[in-house]
Image: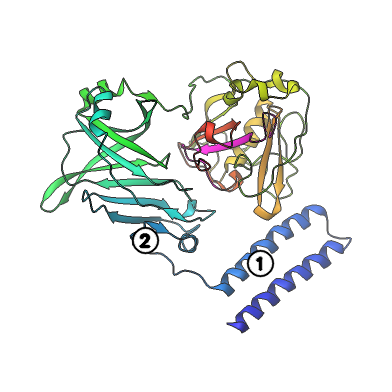
Amino acid sequence: MRRKLRKGFAAFLALFVLLACLAGCGGVNSSQVTRMDRDAQKTAEEVVSSSSGGAETLERETELPADGVITQKQMESIAGKQGEYSFYATDKETGILYTWIYDGARIQNPVEQNLKVSFPQDKTEEVKKAADHASVGLGISLPKTNLAAPARLRLTLTEKWDADTVILVGMADGSPEKVTDVTVGETEKDGGKVTTLEFQVRKTGDVFYLVGGKSAAADSSSSSVSSSSGSAGSEKGSQRTAAGGSTQGSAAQGGTGTAGNTGAAKNTEGSGGTDGTDGTGGSGSGNSGSAHTCTISIDCMTILNNMDNLKSTKTSFVPADGYILYASTVEYTPGETVYDLLYRICRDTGIQMEADYTPVYSSYYVRGINQLYEFDCGELSGWMYSVNGWFPNYGCSKYTISDGDVIQWRYTCDLGRDVGDQYYDN
């Protein structure tokens, strides 16, 4: 073990010395140094990882321990790998089998996952009644956890529901609020057919309810369920921009940053641009005719409720309805990231944007869009992005777009809590 540690340290030291020598040579420009920094960091991380050992690689299917916790080391063993990984357990109280499903390739910043689910039923009948007398219902408590990747949750019930339409709702101010749609199916269990329910996990740390029934009844009940305030909102196809001069904002560095984002042009004024030194900026300009599409929107609606905290010089950059770019379906080139798309859309529409590259995290951090910067509306304000309702715990220059993705850039005035990211809630 000591020999391995010495070898690892020697390799790291050699990389550091090589980088220092190259940086001091007249033949190395700043863009080369930037790439070398990042490559050296990656190699150093690999050396440390190989020398310190780690958890055994998880199987494709893993039974959850009693506490429902998958450790960071375990998540690291599948991070970035192709294919789906599932974690399952059976609730002792109800007999319901629940299975969490992750795409390994989407795990870029592995963190501990608390996946223990319970099924409280004390308010289910009340919620069914509030949902216009839904014929079926099930309470489900999802533990608060910072999801390491978009996750789906599949439930295998102990009975067959007389329902073909189900939605997941939360209870906002005593009224059911739709969180997401649910896929209804059935499977064989103990010699009979039982219902399966599957949905994308968009929120955690609360009790939710699955309600529904037959199509006609479910359509009627869903009419009394409001849409989540964190959804894309406007379906308008036009765009909104605001003109004005450039303002530099102070950078918030570290991890996912004040607003948990990265991705845009570095040190730009006016419309978006990039120095291109890392080879990630500006791609996707030749994707005309592609059949691959996604949806993107940019809004600062939270500022409308916090105008007293907004810097007086920035009021003219806040659209009346809060939308800088209405939800728009756009084409993308396979391999493009959320970073690439934001850069391209802002460049093509003339929306100002600015960001900084953070070498320690190998990613960009968006400081400002449409002249609205981090800290412009309070010390907890800044830009965040979400994809399909999930707020990634890594930079958008690492998030590769897939068909049908719904990408939202939202300005937060409260460290994400006001736009649907619950991770920092107490």
Task: Inspect this view and state whether residue 16 appears.
Answer: yes
Q: Position of residue 8 (x, y in %)?
A: 65, 75
Q: Quadrant of residue 139?
A: top left
Compare residues 124 and 374 and report the one nearer the observer.
124
For this orientation, the residue located farthest to the bottom is: 3
Q: Secondary structure at mark 1?
A: helix
Q: Secondary structure at mark 2?
A: loop
Q: Position of residue 308 (x, y in %)?
A: 66, 21
For this orientation, the residue located farthest to the top is: 320
For this orientation, the residue located farthest to the right is: 26
Which of the labelled discs sits on residue 64, or is there none?
none
Circle 1 crowding by C-alpha within 10 Å: few under 14, some 14–19, many from 20: some
Q: Which residue appears at 54% of the width and 54% of the height?
A: 109
Q: Quadrant of residue 345?
A: top right
Q: Which residue appears at 53% of the width and 53% of the height?
A: 108
For this orientation, the residue located farthest to the left is: 191
Residue placed under numbered mark 2 in the picture = 60
Q: Position of residue 261 (x, y in %)?
A: 61, 41
In this rendering, the answer to whether 421 lies above or below 226 is below
Amino acid carrying mark 2 in the image? Arg
CA distance for labels 2 and 1 = 28 Å
Looking at the image, residue 376 sits to the left or right of residue 193; the answer is right
In magenta, the rendered stretch is 374-393
Looking at the image, residue 123 sits to the left or right of residue 245; the answer is left
Circle 2 crowding by C-alpha within 10 Å: few under 14, some 14–19, many from 20: some
Which of the labelled discs sits on residue 44, or is there none?
1
In this rendering, the answer to whether 136 lies above or below 50 is above
Amino acid carrying mark 1 in the image? Ala
Placement of the N terminus among the 4 image quadrants: bottom right
